Image (tube, rainbow, N blue to C red):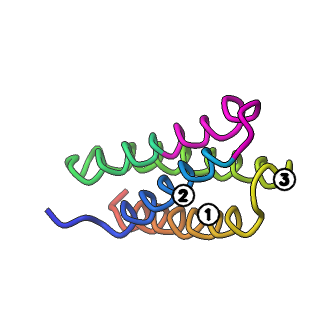
């Protein structure tokens, strides 16, 4: 099966969050960056489940993916506000994450109610 663009975008965010995790001071990793990575991984998990799920179950997986993506966005915002990492890198991650969230919303709206 071909990989969906929303999964590719979310995977890029996941890789960038791992790179950011390496650069963040160790005392902030457990509280800030590792939960962001975990919630991004949960988003990826829900997206892959939605990709393979029957049409009746897809919306529930997409709602869970959207909520995990929103949680990731809040965690990235907290890292940005606390200035734990280079602002440019975090703004790029935020932009890609916003794009992924829009794609998830569009996918969810395209499904029958």
Residue placed under numbered mark 2 in the picture: 16
Q: Is 34 one of the magenta-colored residues?
A: yes
Tell me the residue at 47%/42% (across/down): 64
In this rendering, is residue 2 above or below 68? below
In the structure shown, which secondary structural element does the residue marked by tag 1 occupy?
Answer: helix
Residues in magenta, as a range:
24-40
- Of mark 1 and mark 3, the one earlier in the sequence is 3
In this rendering, is residue 103 above or below 34? below
The foreground one among 94 and 62 is 94
On residue 93, the disc is 1
Q: Position of residue 61 (x, y in %)?
A: 38, 44
Q: Residue 42 appears in which quarter of the rendering?
A: top left
Local packing at callout 3 (Cα closer than 10 Å; few below 14, some 14-19, many 20+) is few
Tell me the residue at 77%/64% (across/down): 87
Local packing at callout 1 (Cα closer than 10 Å; few below 14, some 14-19, many 20+) is many
Is disc 1 in contact with disc 2, using a CB cutoff of under 8 Å?
yes
**In whole angstroms, how far apart are the C-alphas of marks 1 and 3?**
14 Å
């Amino acid at each position: 099966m071909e990989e969906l663009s929303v999964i590719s975008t979310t995977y890029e965010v996941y890789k960038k969050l791992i790179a950011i995790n390496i650069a963040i001071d160790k005392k902030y990793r457990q509280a800030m960056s590792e939960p962001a990575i975990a919630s991004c991984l949960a988003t990826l998990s829900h997206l892959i489940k939605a990709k393979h799920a029957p049409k009746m179950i897809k919306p529930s997986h997409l709602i869970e993916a959207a909520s995990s993506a929103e949680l990731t966005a809040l965690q990235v915002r907290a890292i940005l506000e606390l200035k734990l990492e280079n602002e440019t890198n975090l703004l790029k991650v935020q932009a890609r994450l916003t794009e992924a969230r829009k794609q998830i919303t569009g996918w969810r709206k395209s499904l029958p109610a």
